[in-house]
Amino acid sequence: MPLFALAVIPLIGSVGVALDYSRAAMARTEMRSALDASGLMLSKEALTLTQAQLKRAAKKYFKGNFQRKDTNNVGVTATFSSKQGAYTLKLAATGSLETTFTRIFGIDSVAIASSSEVTWWERKLEVALVLDNTGSMSSNSKMTELKKATHNLLNTLKGAAKKPDDVKVAFIPFNTVVNIGTSYAAKPWFDWTTNGIAPASWSGCVQDRAQPEDTKDTPPDAGTPQTLFPASACNIGSAGLLTSIVPLTTDWTALHNKVDAMTPDGTTNITIGLEWGWHALTAGAPLAQAAAPSTTLEKIIILMTDGENTQNRWSSSPADIDARLKLACANVNAAGLKVYTIRVLDGNASLLQNCASSPTMYYDVQNAAQLNDVFSLIANNLANLRISQ
C-alpha cells in the first residue's frame, strides 16, 4: 500500500497538470473570441480616436466580452494603422490563470496570451433599396415586418460608415409604377403625351419606358422619344398614393420617415422597380446623386418582392413581364452592379435567383418575420469587416 500511494501521487499530479493546462487553453480560446468581438466593435470608431482613446476603448470592450473570473493581471493593447486605403486594427491581451492541482508543484499561475487582427478597406457604398409596395404586402404581416427590417438595415449601414459620406442609400418603393415626386416636373426627360397627363396635374409617377429602353439605363434624351419617361397616374387606390422615392442620400431621418410612409397597394411590376434602383446608382440623369464608378466604390441593389409580376405598361401576362425582368436583370449585372434578391412567400423563385449576382445573394423567405434576419445578414456583409488573423 505505501508503494501504491507513492505511485499514485505523480499520477494524480500529471492529471492535475493536464487539467490546469486544459483550463488555460480554454481561457486562451475565450480570450481570442473576446478580442475578435472587441476588434469588430472598435473598428467602427477607430478612425476618429486618438491612441489614448483607442487604448481605453479597447479595454472597455474587452472587459465586456471576457468574463473569466479566474484570470488575473489582464492587459490589453491596441494598435491602429492605415496604408493606401487599407486599415488594420491589432489587439493583444495577456493574463495569468490561477492554477489548482499544479500548485502542489509550486506553480501558482499559468501565463496566457492571444491576439486578433481586423482589416478593412477604404470603400464607399451606394445602396438602392428596391421594395415591393403592392397590395399583397398587406397580408401575413409582410409590410409590418418589412418596415422593421428596413429600419434595422438602415441603422446598420449608418453605423458601418467610417465617414459621413461613406454610405449613401436610395429608397425605391414600387408597384406597377414608381413615384419619383413632382419636383422633377420641369425636367426635359418626360413623355407627357403617351398618357395625356399635364405637368400641372401630375402626381409624380412614371411607367415603363418604350421598349427596349424599359430594361436599360440609357440616359434620357429629349431628341430620342423612346428614352423619355412616360408620366403616369399613381394608381391611387383605397390605401392612397404610392410613396415617393428618395434618391441617394445620407439623410437617415428622411429615409426612416419614408420607410414608415410605405403603404401596400396596386399590382406588381418588378422590372420598373429594378430599373429605378439602377437609375439611382448611375451618375447623371434622371437622378444625379450617384458618384462615378471607382475601385473604392460598390453599388448595390437590394430587391425585395412578395409576388408574381402581374402588370406592366403593355401586358398582364406574367410570362411576358418576366421576360422583361430577365433582360433588365442581365443588363444590371452586366453593368457591374451587385444585386441581392429576396422573395417573400410568393413569386418566381427561379427568375429572382437568377437575377441575383450570385446564388448566395438570393434569399427565399417563408415567413415574413425572417425578413429582419435576412436584411441584417445583408447589411453586415456590406460592412465588410474581416478578422484576418
Image: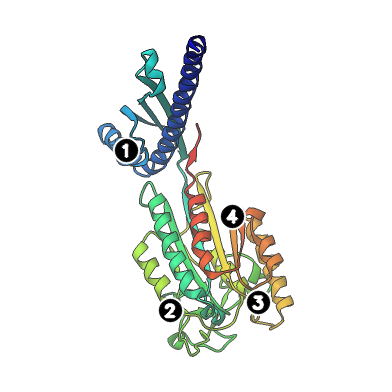
Q: Residue 146: x, y in percent?
A: 48, 69
Q: CA distance from mark 2 to mark 1?
A: 53 Å
Circle 4: residue type: Lys
Could you tell me if residue 282 is visible in this image?
A: no
Q: CA distance from mark 3 to mark 4?
A: 22 Å
Q: Residue 64: x, y in percent?
A: 33, 42
For the residues bearing labels 2 and 3, Cβ distance under 8 angstroms: no
Q: Secondary structure at mark 1?
A: helix
Q: Secondary structure at mark 4?
A: strand
Q: Which mark is residue 182?
A: 2
Circle 2: residue type: Thr
Q: Which mark is residue 338?
A: 4
Q: Nearer the viewer, mark 1 or mark 3?
A: 1
Label 2 packing within 10 angstroms: few (<14), some (14-19), many (20+)? some
Circle 3: residue type: Asn
Most extreme residue toward the front is 1
